[in-house]
């Protein structure tokens, strides 16, 4: 299957407005604007997804909605994609949609870079906010995938202009 892993866009810092909590952090105005350009870049690349899944945290829901507005689809929330997701969680999520390919998953760090490293057999992936990894996966287990592309946010924005 083709698996697309997307990190959410730039979000507000935890502070008094969020009760110093991580969960209510929303995308900033800059984060929204950048993510819109990045989504245009994804569309320019011909990126598509038969299914878009997202962490239930607001910054991921907002990111997934922006991307879906450009590439199509409707994001679906899955609590297993919350911060702390590991490869077993990702496997459980994907198993629920056996015919979905390509599948886009919007999530968090360090979960996404750890998933890419595990699937590809190691290495370090710089998953900046708004980065997109494209993998071909034969099995959601260590070494079961191949990294096809890693698009940093600046490249996606440049393609979206």
Image: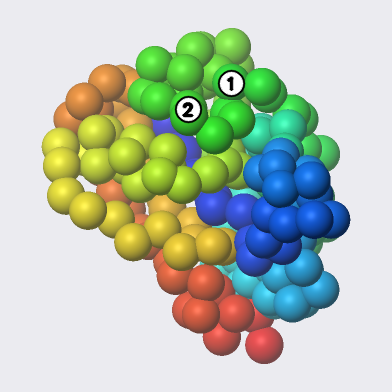
Q: Which mark is residue 85?
A: 2
- Residue 116 visible somewhere in the drawing: yes
- Residue 99 visible somewhere in the drawing: no
Q: Residues within 10 Å of mark 2 (few under 14, many from 20)?
A: many
The residue wearing badge 1 is 80
Q: Residues within 10 Å of mark 1 (few under 14, many from 20)?
A: some
Please tell me in which quadrant of the rendered image residue 56 appears: top right
Where does residue 3 sit, x and y in percent of width and height? 46, 38
Of callouts 2 and 1, the N-terminal one: 1
**Labels 2 and 1 touching (C-beta < 8 A):** yes
Where does residue 19 sit, x and y in percent of width and height? 79, 46
Name the residue located 48 percent from the left edge and 29 percent from the top edge: 84
Question: What is the quadrant of the C terminus in the image?
Answer: bottom right
Identify whether 60 is placed above or below 149. Answer: above
**100 or 63, nearer to the observer:** 63
Name the residue located 67 percent from the left edge and 61 percent from the top edge: 13
* Mark pair 2, 1: CA separation: 6 Å
**4 or 25, nearer to the observer:** 25
Where does residue 36 sit, x and y in percent of width and height? 75, 70
Please tell me in which quadrant of the rendered image residue 34 appears: bottom right
Identify whether 66 is placed above or below 106. Answer: below
Instruction: Classify residue 25 as left or right of residue 155.
Output: right
């Amino acid at each position: 299957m083709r698996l697309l892993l997307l990190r959410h866009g730039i979000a507000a810092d935890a502070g008094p407005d969020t009760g110093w909590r991580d969960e209510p952090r929303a995308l900033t105005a800059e984060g929204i604007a950048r993510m819109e350009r990045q989504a245009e870049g994804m569309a320019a690349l011909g990126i598509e997804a038969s299914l878009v899944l997202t962490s239930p945290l607001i910054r991921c829901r907002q990111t997934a909605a922006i991307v879906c507005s450009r590439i199509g689809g409707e994001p679906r929330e899955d609590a297993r994609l919350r911060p702390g997701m590991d490869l077993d969680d990702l496997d459980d999520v994907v198993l629920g949609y056996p015919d979905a390919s390509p599948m886009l998953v919007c999530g968090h760090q360090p979960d996404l870079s750890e998933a890419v490293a595990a699937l590809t057999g190691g290495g370090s992936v710089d998953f900046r906010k708004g980065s997109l990894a494209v993998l071909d996966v034969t099995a959601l287990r260590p070494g079961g995938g191949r990294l096809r592309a890693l698009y940093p946010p600046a490249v996606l924005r440049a393609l979206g202009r």
